[in-house]
Image (cartoon, rainbow, N blue to C red):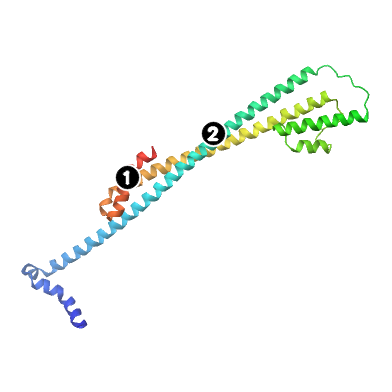
Amino acid sequence: MAVWAVLMLLALPALMLLGDAEKMRDPVGALNNVGVIRRYHEERARRRAEAVEAARFAAELRTAAVQAREAAGRWQAHWRAAEEHADGAWQAWRKAEQRFARTRAGAAYPVPDQARTPQEYADRETFLHRALRAAAKRGDLPATALAAAIAGRDGWDPRLHPVDQEIVVLRAVAGHRRRSHRRAVAAEQAAWQDARLAASTRDRLCREAVTAAARAAAVHRHLPDREFRIVLVGSRSWSRRLA
């Protein structure tokens, strides 16, 4: 039976020719028609594969564009926060400079220095440590300032009169706030660059995704039903989703 089946398949073209008088008169043309049909199916398969690839590429770009849009929003929020922090740092620096200027102007006249006793030295040291601890708690000085004063580093002198110590502390506060403002400005500028780059990437991916969706929609007739629905919905709603 297997042998007979193979023989029947091999004889099928001849039977088709025998069954059609026109084909019998032109067997070469009949064979050409068979070749045309084969090439048609090959071309159809190629177009279908290209359409499927276009649909998948459009879907991938659509996903990338949505993610880029979300990332751009996060970078924009980060830049806004950095900008607000820089503004706050500038206000804190300005207030620190004003306090220092007022205190220095009020202490323009020399303070009479009384006899220095061990108790007075202890009181002055306590005053300095208390002032530094309060400044560090407010954020006017780094936490390392108190440790440096206790160790006698960074120019802290517990032997100074409390008025002079206050001026020294306020000068250090103004310097610390100035450096904090500079760091905040640098961070704000870096955040602005990152936000601008994220926005540029978002816009580029959105344009590419719209173009890919249009190309996929143009060849949707070659797609299976499921992928046709994906491309059709994506091409129609893409602009609204990115608005």
- Residue at x 73%, y 29% (from the top left corner): 173
Q: Which SS class for mark 2? A: helix
Which quadrant is the C terminus positioned in? Answer: top left
For disc 1, the marked residue is: 235
For disc 2, the marked residue is: 80
Q: Residues within 10 Å of mark 2 (few under 14, many from 20)?
A: some
Residue 2 appears at what percent x and percent y? 21, 82
Compared across the picture, whether 165 is left or right of 84 comes to: right
- Residue at x 31%, y 43% (from the top left corner): 236
Q: Examine the rendered structure and indicate whether residue 83 appears above or below residue 112.
A: below
Quadrant assignment, res 165 = top right
- Identified by mark 2, the residue type is Arg
Inter-mark Cα distance, 1 to 2? 34 Å
Quadrant assignment, res 13 = bottom left
Q: Is residue 76 or residue 13 the one in the foreground?
A: 76
Q: Examine the rendered structure and indicate whether residue 164 appears above or below residue 216.
A: above
